[in-house]
C-alpha cells in the first residue's frame, strides 16, 4: 500500500483508515526521519482503534500505553538499540495489545516475523510518501 | 498541620516536609541519572529506581526537617498523571504508610501540584489568576477561579514544549535533556536569525502545537551544510527557543487580557527557561507574573505537600483504594 500525504491531516487519516485492518497482538514498525509523520500517523491509528486518550510522541517517556477498546503500546526506540530488555521489550510486545514502534529498525533481530512495516519519506515541506508492507515470514 | 509530600510520577524520586500553609522544612529530590544515556525516561527503569530510592529519600526529608514520622499529620502523594509504574511506587508507599501509621491521606494531581509551587513561594499569588503549566510532558493553560477550582483553557494538541526542546536538541546533536542544552547553546545567538513558524491554532484559541515547529527545524537544517549549522548553532537554537517562548508567552498574556485577570502564574520545568521568564515579564504590562525558583519548577514533592496540605486542611481525604491514573486530567 502506497500513498502520498499532502498534509499532517492526510497522514492522520491514513493512520485512521489503516486501523480497521488491525487487531490485538498486531505489531507495526514505523520507519522515517524526525518530522516525517510517524507520530501523526500513530495519532490517527490510535483514534481509529478507539483509544481513550490522544496518542502523543513517546520521545520523552519512550513507552506510552493508551487505554481503550484494545490497549495500545507506543514505543520510541531512537536511543535504545542494545537495551531492549531494559524497557521490558518481551513483555511489551507479547501482551494482547497493538504494538506501534517508532525507529523499529533499532530492534533488529528482535522484530517479530509477522508484522506491518510503515515507511515515511519526506518529499517536501508538506508532502510525505507513506508505504505499508505486510511481512509474513514463517521462519524460512 | 505537618505534611509529608511524595512525588514519583516520572524520573524524580522526591519527598518534602511542610507546615501548612507554606513553611517548607525539607525538600529532597533525587533525579534519576540512569535515563541519561537513553535520551528519554525509560518507564521500567524509572519504577525500579523509585523502589530503590524512595525510602531513603523520605528518611532524608524527615532528618533534614528534624521531624519524626510520628509527628506527621497528613500524607500527600501524586496519583497522576505520569508513568503508571512510577506513580504506583509512590502511591503504594504512601497508602501503606498512611494505613500503618494511621495518618490522613490524600492523592494529588501532579498538574495541580505545579500550580501550587507558586502558592508555596508567593502568598500574593491569589486566585483568580491564569496558570501556564509547561514541562517535559505537559503544556496547559488554566483559569484558576479559586484554589481547587480550575478551568482548562487549552493544552497542547501534540508535543509538550519540553518534548519539542528534546527533539530539536536531538536533531541538532545536542545533549539530553534538550531544554537546558538549547538554552545554553542559544546564549549569544541571534533570536531573529530565522523565523520559525508559530502555530497559533486560530485567533482565539488557547491550544498549543509544537510538532510542526520541530518539523520546521528538521526541514530547515536538512539542506544546510554541516559547517553552516556548526557556525550558526547558537542562532538556530536562539531562533527556535524564541518561537517556543513567543507562543507560550503570547497565549498566557492573551488569556489574562481576555479574562481580565491581573495575575499570571507560570510553572513546570520549562518555566525555568530564562528567555520565557524574560519574555513574559516584557509583555506583562501591568500583569503580575509569578515564577517559582528553579528547584520548584522541576518535579518536586514540596508542591505536592503544599497542595495536599490545602486539601487536607479542608477535611478532604482519599480512600485507601485510590489507584494511579496515568492520564489524569485537571
Image (spheres, helix red, strand yellow):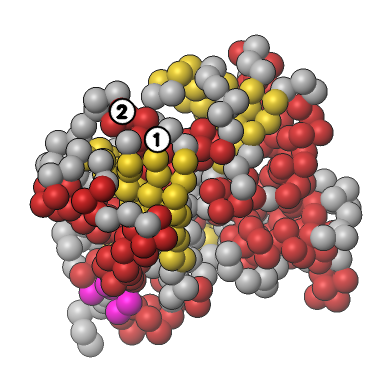
Give how far across and how far down residue A10 sits, in percent: 52, 42
Judge whether residue B52 can be spotted in this image.
yes
Q: Chain of mark 1?
A: B
Looking at the image, residue B192 sits to the left or right of residue A4; the answer is right
**Viewer-nearest residue: B12 or B244:** B12
- Disc number for residue A58: none
Give how far across and how far down residue A52 sits, in percent: 29, 38
Q: Does residue A2 belong to the magenta stretch?
A: no
Which quadrant holds residue B257? top right
Q: Residue at x 70, y 68 (%)?
A: B172
Looking at the image, residue B108 sits to the left or right of residue B22; the answer is left
Few, some or many residues within 10 Å of mark 1 (<14, 14–19, 20+): some
Q: Secondary structure at mark 1?
A: loop
Task: Work out whether mark 2 precedes mark 1 in sequence or the reverse, and give the earlier one.
Answer: 1
Q: Which residue is labeled 2 in the image?
A: B313
Q: Secondary structure at mark 2?
A: helix
Q: Residue at x 76, y 34 (%)?
A: B281
Image quadrant containing the N terminus of chain B: top left
Q: Chain of mark 2?
A: B
Q: Residue at x 39, y 67 (%)?
A: B42
Q: Residue at x 56, y 48 (%)?
A: B297
Q: Which residue is labeled 1 in the image?
A: B20
- The answer to whether marks 2 and 1 mark residues whose Cβ atoms lie closer than 8 Å is yes
Which quadrant holds residue A20? top left
Give how far across and how far down residue B291 sits, in percent: 63, 39
Q: What residue span does the magenta drawing correspond to? A: A85-90
Residue A50's place in the image compared with B211, above or below, is above
Residue B170's place in the image compared with B90, above or below, is below
Looking at the image, residue A132 sits to the left or right of residue B258; the answer is left
Q: Residue furthest bottom?
A: A140
Amino acid at each position: 500500500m502506497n500513498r502520498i500525504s499532502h498534509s499532517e491531516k492526510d497522514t492522520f487519516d491514513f493512520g485512521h483508515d489503516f486501523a480497521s485492518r488491525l487487531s490485538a497482538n498486531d505489531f507495526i514498525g514505523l520507519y522515517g526521519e524526525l518530522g516525517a509523520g510517524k507520530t501523526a500517523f500513530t495519532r490517527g491509528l490510535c483514534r481509529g482503534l478507539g483509544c481513550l486518550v490522544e496518542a502523543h510522541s513517546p520521545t520523552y517517556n519512550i513507552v506510552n500505553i493508551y487505554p481503550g477498546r484494545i490497549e495500545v503500546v507506543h514505543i520510541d526506540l531512537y536511543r535504545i538499540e542494545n537495551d531492549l530488555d531494559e524497557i521490558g521489550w518481551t513483555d511489551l510486545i507479547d501482551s494482547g495489545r497493538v504494538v506501534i514502534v517508532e525507529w523499529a529498525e533499532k530492534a533488529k533481530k528482535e522484530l517479530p516475523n509477522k508484522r506491518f512495516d510503515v515507511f515515511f519519506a519526506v518529499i517536501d515541506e508538506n508532502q510525505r510518501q507513506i508505504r505499508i508492507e505486510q511481512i509474513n515470514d514463517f521462519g524460512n | 498541620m505537618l505534611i509529608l509530600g511524595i512525588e514519583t510520577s516520572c524520573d524524580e524520586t522526591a519527598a518534602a516536609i511542610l507546615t501548612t500553609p507554606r513553611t517548607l522544612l525539607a525538600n529532597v529530590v533525587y533525579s534519576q541519572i540512569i535515563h541519561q544515556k537513553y535520551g528519554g525516561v525509560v518507564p521500567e527503569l524509572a519504577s525500579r529506581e523509585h523502589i530503590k530510592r524512595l525510602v531513603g529519600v523520605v528518611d532524608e526529608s524527615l532528618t533534614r526537617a528534624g521531624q519524626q514520622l510520628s509527628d506527621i499529620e497528613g500524607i500527600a502523594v501524586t496519583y497522576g498523571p505520569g508513568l503508571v509504574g512510577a506513580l504506583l511506587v509512590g502511591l503504594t508507599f504512601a497508602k501503606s504508610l498512611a494505613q500503618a501509621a494511621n495518618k490522613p491521606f490524600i492523592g494529588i494531581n501532579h498538574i495541580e501540584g505545579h500550580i501550587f509551587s507558586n502558592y508555596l513561594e508567593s502568598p500574593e499569588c491569589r486566585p483568580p489568576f491564569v496558570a501556564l503549566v509547561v514541562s517535559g510532558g505537559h503544556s496547559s493553560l488554566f483559569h484558576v477561579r479559586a484554589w481547587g477550582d480550575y478551568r482548562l483553557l487549552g493544552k497542547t494538541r501534540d508535543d509538550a514544549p519540553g518534548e519539542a526542546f528534546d527533539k530539536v536538541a536531538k536533531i541538532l546533536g545536542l545533549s539530553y535533556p534538550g531544554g537546558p542544552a538549547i538554552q545554553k547553546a542559544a546564549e549569544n545567538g541571534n533570536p531573529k536569525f530565522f523565523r520559525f513558524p508559530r502555530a497559533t491554532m486560530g485567533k482565539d484559541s488557547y491550544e498549543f502545537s509544537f510538532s510542526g515547529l520541530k518539523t520546521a527545524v528538521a526541514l530547515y537544517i536538512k539542506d544546510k551544510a554541516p559547517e553552516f549549522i556548526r557556525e550558526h548553532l547558537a542562532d538556530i537554537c536562539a531562533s527556535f527557543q524564541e518561537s517556543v517562548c513567543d507562543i507560550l508567552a503570547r497565549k498566557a498574556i492573551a488569556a489574562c487580557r481576555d479574562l481580565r485577570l491581573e495575575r499570571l502564574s507560570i510553572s513546570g520545568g520549562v518555566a525555568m527557561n530564562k528567555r520565557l521568564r524574560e519574555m513574559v515579564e516584557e509583555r506583562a504590562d501591568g500583569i503580575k507574573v509569578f515564577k517559582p525558583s528553579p528547584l520548584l519548577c522541576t518535579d518536586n514533592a514540596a508542591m505536592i505537600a503544599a497542595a495536599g496540605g490545602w486539601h487536607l486542611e479542608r477535611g478532604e481525604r482519599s480512600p485507601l483504594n485510590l489507584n494511579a491514573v496515568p492520564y489524569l486530567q485537571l
